[in-house]
Image (spheres, grey):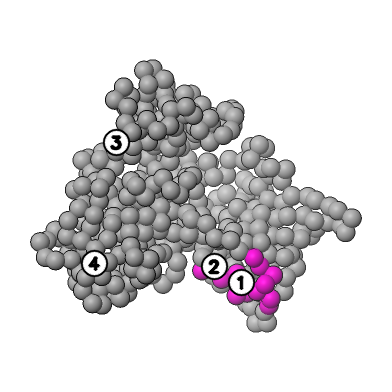
Amino acid sequence: MSDDSLTIRTLTTDDLPAFAELLASAFLTDLTDGLKHRETLVFEPERAHGVFDGDELIGTGELLTRKITVPGAGQTPFAAVTAVGVAPGHRRRGALTRVMRAQLHGLHEGGGEPFAALWASEAVIYPRFGYGLATQFYRAKVRAKSAFRPGVGLEAEPVREIKRAQAIPLIKSIYEKEASQRVGALDRPESTWEFILDDPEYRRQGATALKFAVLPDGYVIYRVKNDWNEEGPRGILTVQELVATTPEAYATLYRFLLDYDLVVTVETFAALDEPLIHLLDNPRAMTRSAGDSLWFRLVDVDRALITRHYNAPVDLVLGVRDAFCPWNTGNWRLVTAADGHAEVTRVEDAPDLELDVTDLGAIFLGGTRPSTLAAAGRIKERTAGAVSRATAAFATDREPCCVESF
């Protein structure tokens, strides 16, 4: 349903108070000075849209200027969709559709980033705008003091817990090294670091302020929450981020966390192929539950597909459907070379594979296999062996990982 009385325009800095108030209401929280400050850190008014009912702001959506590491090509510009919200009482009037159209059609018409990505508050919403589930993660709980299997290599140098001001320059350097190589990782402008490390008390949920521990090749940011019962200490340590550039640093940081005094549970967010469970002598000391992270959208099929490298040579015609961005609908020939580079051209040839643009977004980073979507009936194979060849071409050595919401 679309309401023709609504209008949409680009926002200005003067709209920030109303923008923050709407988001607080849409996401079921109170507007505080801390929330206003967080929005100010990353607000890009020239890339934010507002939907208005008269003078009242009733819908929003913003694009952040970020980069993401794509297979074989390093960090590449993408449109990071955020701050999407509709005021209570104004749903089902087409406000969200107007925002999505302004974003995606604007990127296409202006030659902006070739793809967009978002974290979804509700997973059923965004496939209708062409976003496919591209990366997942898991939440894990590990029993403290759990032993590692024999032979796990550790750093000789001990982990040091240091003050925030001393830690920040060290962790930035380590993060930049790792993020440039890990598919799905995002760049971090200075404003983003401020946003991520912003640590007001209302966000701590009874735990401590953020703590920082470092090695030369890794770091961890975490909180601890004190708790006791008749059996003794029942503390919980929650990892916000752990980055390591060597296996030894990775194992040493987790050994440090698992041995933390007065803690019985270590909670963490991790990639689907996180190696932690393979360090444990008893894998059942760790429990996991999966969740979705990045939803990916190709703005322009031809511009997007050539930005990444491919794992195997392939020559396939993709029959793409795209109801929301109709310029993508049609048959596209994807030809990849031995060095991973690709050429993409519109053709009249019959397709080897038929798929929706949501499926193309899902497989782009390598986290969702074409063979998986074919098994789900989402990708239709019209030429024998095409699914297998596409699966090999889009594959990556490791699961893409993005545990940083934006």
The residue that label 3 is drawn on is 102
Rounded to the nearest whole Å, what is the CA distance between mark 3 and mark 4? 30 Å
Q: Residue at x 25, y 70 (%)?
A: 381
Please say if the residues under marks 1 and 2 sit with CB atoms less than 8 Å apart: yes
282 vs 323, nearest the viewer: 323
- Read off the residue under disc 1: 277
- Left or right placement of residue 136 versus residue 201 in this view: left
Disc 3/disc 1 C-alpha distance (Å): 44 Å
Q: Tell me, yes or no, whether the two marked residues, 2 and 4, touch with CB atoms within 8 Å.
A: no
- Label 2 to label 4: alpha-carbon separation: 32 Å
Circles 2 and 3: CB distance less than 8 Å?
no
Give the Cα distance between marks 1 and 2: 7 Å
Disc on the earlier residue, 3 or 4: 3
Magenta extent: 273-287
Q: Specify whether residue 13 is painted magenta.
A: no
Of callouts 3 and 1, the N-terminal one: 3
Helix, strand or loop under label 3: helix
Q: Helix, strand, or loop for circle 2? A: loop
Label 3 CA crowd tier, 10 Å (few <14, some 14–19, many 20+) = some
Task: Please determine whether, in this image, residue 311 is positioned above or below residue 142.
Answer: below
Task: Look at 29% across and 25% down and name the residue there.
Answer: 4
- Residue 213's spot in the image, x, y percent? 65, 57
> Residue 398 got which mark?
none
* Alpha-carbon span between mark 4 and mark 1: 37 Å
Q: Which amino acid lies under the numbered mark 1 shown in the image of this protein?
A: Ile
Work out whether residue 392 or residue 112 is closer to the camera in this orientation and state it: 392
Residue found at the very far right of the displayed protein: 230
Q: Which residue is tagged 2?
A: 274
Residue at position x 54%, y 45% from top?
196
Residue contact between numbered discs 3 and 1, judged by CB atoms under 8 Å: no
Is residue 276 on the magenta stretch?
yes
